[in-house]
Structures are given as structure tokens and as C-alpha cells.
Amino acid sequence: MGKKKVIFICRGNSCRSQMAEGFARKLYGDQWEAHSAGTAPEGVNPNAVSVMSEVGIDISKNESKVLDQALLNSADLVVALCDIQEGCFVLPPTVRYIHYPVEDPVRVAGSINEMSVFRNVRDKVKKLVEELLMQT
């Protein structure tokens, strides 16, 4: 039996979903084929790259990708990390879906605690990935 396919989605595919893809590949790459995408890709955020490198995961070569219907249709699991109001995607009714909103760390850009917010989001995303992919 082949690997299961998981897709992590957030609007910009710049932080949350990129982090989730990185954790899934590193921790569960032997069991899961991990992807990430967004409805309005913005490029991978340098702060996301930085906080992921702090935990030994390199996402610096990742690219923001547009959510593709064919990819969605081939998924075993789709995890939306965006808020409902962000208008993340349209999901086929046959695909297993989990909505786990995580704050978008980009919203604190320029604040004094910007990097601590990115680290907090990274840690939440790691916990989510571990809980979801370990059980499934």
C-alpha cells in the first residue's frame, strides 16, 4: 500500500501550511505524502523559514502554490489552517476534511513580538501535525 496524501491549506500558502508540510515531511514522510497550497499564494514568508530552521527543518526552497482541484481530488486528508472567513477553498465532498484554524502570524508583521508569534504558531502547527498524522 502506498503513502497517504495530505494537503495543508491556508490562504497565502506562506506560513501555516508551509510549516505543516515541513513537519509532515520530516516526521511522517515514510507514511504520508505531504503538500501545501493556498487560494492566493504570497510566497514563503522569511520568518516562517527562520523559525522552522530553528527546529531543524529547511523550507527555504519551498514555493507557494495555488490550490489545485486535481490535487484536492487525490487527497486522503485535507487540513485547513485558515479562518473560515478567509475563504480558503472549495472541497470535494468525498475528501476527508479537518478544519483547524491557526492565527496567521503575518498579521503581527512589524510588531515587537513578531518572532515569538511565529514560534508560537510553529509549535501549534507541529502539535496538530503530530496529533493528526500519528492517529490516521
Image (spheres, rainbow, N blue to C red):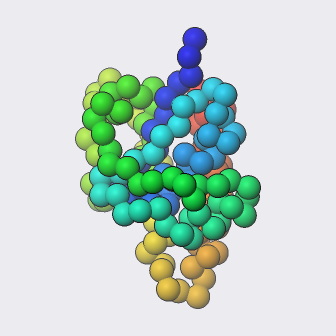
Q: Residue at x 58, y 88 (%)?
A: 112
Q: Position of residue 46 (x, y in %)?
A: 54, 69
- Residue 12 versus residue 28 in the image, above or below: below
Q: Position of residue 135 (x, y in %)?
A: 63, 29
Image quadrant containing the N terminus: top right
* Residue projecting furthest to the front: 61
Q: Position of residue 48 (x, y in %)?
A: 56, 64
**Front residue (pair 135, 61):** 61
* Residue projecting furthest to the top: 1
Image quadrant containing the C terminus: top right
Q: Residue at x 63, y 46 (%)?
A: 23
Count of marks overlaid on the render? 0
**Front residue (pair 107, 57):** 57
Q: Position of residue 24 (x, y in %)?
A: 61, 41
**Front residue (pair 90, 22):** 22
12 relative to 1 in the view: left or right:
left
Specify whether residue 121 is in view.
no
Q: Residue at x 26, y 41 (%)?
A: 90
Specify whether residue 56 is in view.
yes
Q: Residue at x 73, y 58 (%)?
A: 55
26 relative to 35 in the view: left or right:
right
